[in-house]
Image (tube, helix red, strand yellow):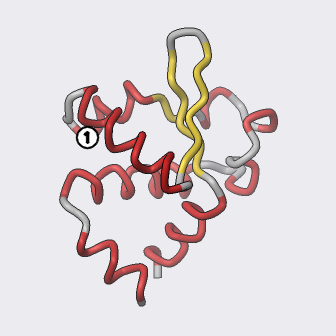
Amino acid sequence: MAVKALFALLDERRQAIIRLICEHIRESKKCRDLTNPRKIGETTFLYLTGICKRTGMSHITVSKIVQEFQEAGLVEIYEIGRAKILMPTSVMLEICEALKE
């Protein structure tokens, strides 16, 4: 209940990115392995550029919001070459579970 109330206080852009991450987690077949980048396949990656395309936001806006999420401990960002890959932490998994109900 408290998670939903706090989620409602966020602006639309942050809510959209959290919804996208939660949707990605639900679509993933190996949800429990999302926090360990060594155990996931390429199809479960969530690229920063993909978030921009799916939400319709600019790359700079998404980068700043994801950086805030990283500082809060909700996601981890891994740089592989020029790509930035977003990995949810266990805290984000708990938030998504609370929002699903």
Tell whether 7 sits left or right of 94: left
Quadrant showing the N terminus: bottom left
Q: Quadrant of residue 36?
A: top right
Q: Is residue 79 above or below residue 70?
A: above
Residue at 26% in and 28% down? 60
Residue at image mark 1: 55
Q: How far from the left and from the top, in percent, is residue 12?
A: 19, 58
Residue furthest to the right in view is 39
- Residue drawn at 61 percent across, 48 percent down: 28
User: Relative to 65, is 25 above or below?
Assistant: below
Place residue 85 in its image quadrant: top right
Locate residue 33 relative to residue 23 in the image: left or right: right
Q: Secondary structure at mark 1?
A: helix
The answer to whether 60 appears left or right of 41 in the picture is left
Residue count near mark 1 (Cα–Cα under 10 Å), binned few <14, some 14–19, many ≥20: few
Count of numbered labels shown in the rendering: 1
User: At x 58% / y 9%, what residue is drawn?
Assistant: 81
Locate residue 68, reporting x and y percent: 40, 47
Farthest-out residue, front: 71
Amino acid under label 1? Thr
Q: Where residue 35 appears, x then y in whole percent?
A: 70, 48
Residue 94 location (% of width, % of height):
59, 70
In the displayed structure, 85 sits above or below 97; it is above
Is 26 in front, or is 52? 52
Q: Residue at x 67, y 50 (%)?
A: 29
Q: Most extreme residue toward the top, as rendered?
A: 81
